[in-house]
Amino acid sequence: MMKALALKKPGTIDGLEIVEIQQPSILADEVRIKVKAVGLNPSDFQTIEYTKDLDSEQVMILGLDISGIVEEVGSDVTDFKKGDRVFYLRELSNKNGGFAEFSVAKSNHLVNIPDNVSFEVAAASPGAGFTAFKAIEQKLRPLPGKTILIHGGAGGVGGYAIQLAKRRGAKVITTCLGRDKDYVLDLGADLVIDFQKENVYEIIESYTKGLGVNYILSTIGTEGATKDLTILAFDGEIAVTSGFPDFSKIKFYEKQLTIHEIALGLALSNEDLKIQKSIQSIGEKFVELLANNEIIPPSIDLVELEDIPRKLKEIKKGQITGKVVARIQ
């Protein structure tokens, strides 16, 4: 048996309950992990709210960012063994998530954790870090001296993206709450805008002398992504993680813009081996940067399994700086 925080009533964060259930079994190509820590993400509460019905026999355990110790390997697994320290990004179709004492994953999703990286730091990395890496290193690839707008610099994705963009020599503009300005400046941002008290688009227009930014990482939904296009430079590129721009508002060919979509959890659910290996490779490169102190983890708010519902509500309200990580065992 194991303890888990399961979704018992769909549609509301209050539908999460601590339960005692059977440990999940594994298939030949899978691994059972003793969960040490799990990172919280907006997609956790979004999945809860989008879920309308649950089968009476179904147990849905959320949690995408998982770190722990390999407990058991399937008969076809040769690249991991019992006792290995690992972390991974859970695909959305896998109902055995990290809000539990044990989780299950396909072996080609797992990445080894170096000895000098803690379980808590590893658990703060997959959803936010892999997304930031995909956006900055594989999609936008900002050139030295060019400007990039990164929304939500005090969040997990934004905090990692700022550092990755600065490594490439870009000039980083970011938005955040006023209370977090010093935090994101310490991460390397060149210009920080309080989106609650300042006019983001007027400031960027002035900063870029009317030319606009060369790149944008948009994490704020369709309305924000649509407005972002007004300050995107000619030949500019925008990567979106939460809602495409409203294409009816776009004058096609006017800016020769390029749009990139990023949704790694959904991509993993396609069961495409090439995609799985690609995301595993991102994890390997990303954790190497952490191990070598080439990037630092975000500020981590460390909580217990029982605290997850309360923290998900805070994330929904935009009250979190950095990442929330829950200790499991």
Image (cartoon, helix red, strand yellow):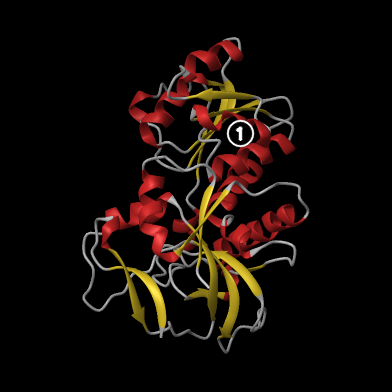
In the displayed structure, does residue 251 sit left or right of residue 39?
left
Q: Residue furthest bottom?
A: 75
Name the spot of residue 248 as percent of width and height, x first. Answer: 33, 27
Write down the quadrant of residue 61 in the picture: bottom left
Residue 74 against residue 112 in the figure, above or below: below
Residue at image x 74%, y 62%?
116
Q: Residue furthest right?
A: 292
Residue 102 against residue 5 in the figure, above or below: below
Task: Categorize mark 1 by other alpha carbons within 10 Å: few (<14), some (14-19), many (20+).
Answer: many
Residue at image x 54%, y 38%?
154
Name the spot of residue 78 as percent of width and height, x first. Answer: 66, 83
Name the spot of residue 269 as percent of width and height, x first. Answer: 44, 63
Give the camera-side residue of 70 and 94. 70
Q: Considering the image in quadrants, where does the N terminus appear?
A: bottom left
Name the spot of residue 321 as percent of width and height, x first. Answer: 51, 42
Write down the quadrant of residue 158 in the picture: top right
- Residue beneath label 1, please? 184
Residue at image x 42%, y 72%?
96
Q: Is residue 141 visible?
A: no
Give the camera-side residue of 309 and 41. 309
Q: Is residue 202 visible?
A: yes
Q: Secondary structure at mark 1?
A: helix
Q: How many numbered marks appear?
A: 1
Write down the quadrant of residue 34 in the picture: bottom right
